[in-house]
Image (cartoon, rainbow, N blue to C red):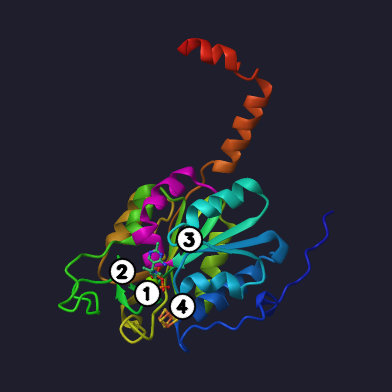
Amino acid sequence: MSAQAAEISPQEYKTDEHPIWCPGCGDFGVLASLYQSLAALKIHSKDLVVVSGIGCSGRTPGFVKSYGFHVVHGRVLPVSLGVKLANPKLTVIGVGGDGDGFAIGGGHIAHAVRRNFDVAYLVMDNATYGLTKGQYSPTAPKGFMAGSTPYGNIEKPINPLAMLIGYGATFVARGYSGKPRELADLITRAIEHKGFAFMDIISPCITFYNTYKVIPPQLAEVPKDHDATSRTRAFELALREDKVYLGVFYQTQEPTFEEGVAQVIKAAQASAPPRLDEIFAEFA
Ligand SMILES: Cc1ncc(C[n+]2csc(CCOP(=O)(O)OP(=O)(O)O)c2C)c(N)n1
Ligand code: SF4
Ligand SMILES: [Mg+2]
């Protein structure tokens, strides 16, 4: 019989570093929910790696007692994959902003998703570049006014949930920093999910784009009769514009990249290695 893992309080994940986010920033709610989830899952700090990109959201590893990487802008997913491959036993959580993930890092998502490596990727989505003073981001709405778009944003925003469902992510959900208890439950499910778990987390930037006042009336729970095992239904829900739905849109199980790599290593070890002289002979 295995021993019951010891209880861990959410407070135990706090580091001595105090977040320097603006008071009231949505990222505080996300961080509090993350602590709750880690405690609920009793994940020991030594078994946890938090990888972040650049942005206000990118500061998160400094505030979570764990191993952490604050990596190059937009490279959360390649580094997370490297960590997971190096030690598949670790719990790997990727965090970053909408700019980090969907602009400069956007090209990595499709390939991370189709590999289905085991990661919880949490995008703290404030529809702006908070750190660099509020420029429009890939999720900023049309008409968004900022220093970079003084006459209003003329580009249409991407739909992260539809994009990730389309790419084939095996877990896709949306949460909100203003509902920390529900958010903690969703993050817990994302971490528990074996494979690529994506969460778009609405996390308002109160300094440059404070949506705390306009978001709540638009929110609704994912309908109780939603079939989250159907990719088609999930895609339909992601495209709906009547409400901003919170909850799990899609979840399925598929083999992970780590499992595939382990099989390849086994097969390679069981077979004779290719002889270099034979390979060179082909080109002689
Ligand atoms: C290669 C590179 N390009 C540009 C930047 C400047 N930069 C820093 S953070 C950032 C965007 C931050 O926005 P987001 O990812 O949404 O994070 P937030 O601050 O909103 O949490 C940019 C463009 C950079 N640090 N590195
Ligand atoms: S600038 Fe915006 S995103 Fe950055 S800490 Fe302040 S409120 Fe948060
Ligand atoms: Mg942002």
Residue type highlighted by circle 1:
Asn
Residue type highlighted by circle 4:
Ser
The numbered mark, 1 or 4, whose residue comes first in the sequence reads: 1
Which residues are drawn in magenta?
A: 97-117
Disc 3 to disc 4: CB gap under 8 Å: no
Residue that lies at the very extreme toward the front in this rendered image: 284
| Residue at numbered disc 2 | 137
Residue type highlighted by circle 2:
Ser
| Residue at numbered disc 4 | 177
| Residue at numbered disc 1 | 126
Residue 73 point in image, percent of width and height: 44, 62
Callout in the foreground (1, 4): 1
Q: Determine the main secondary structure of the stretch shown in magenta.
A: helix
Q: Residues within 10 Å of mark 4 (few under 14, many from 20)?
A: many
When asked about the image quadrant of residue 97, the answer is bottom left
Mark-to-mark CA distance, 3 and 1: 20 Å
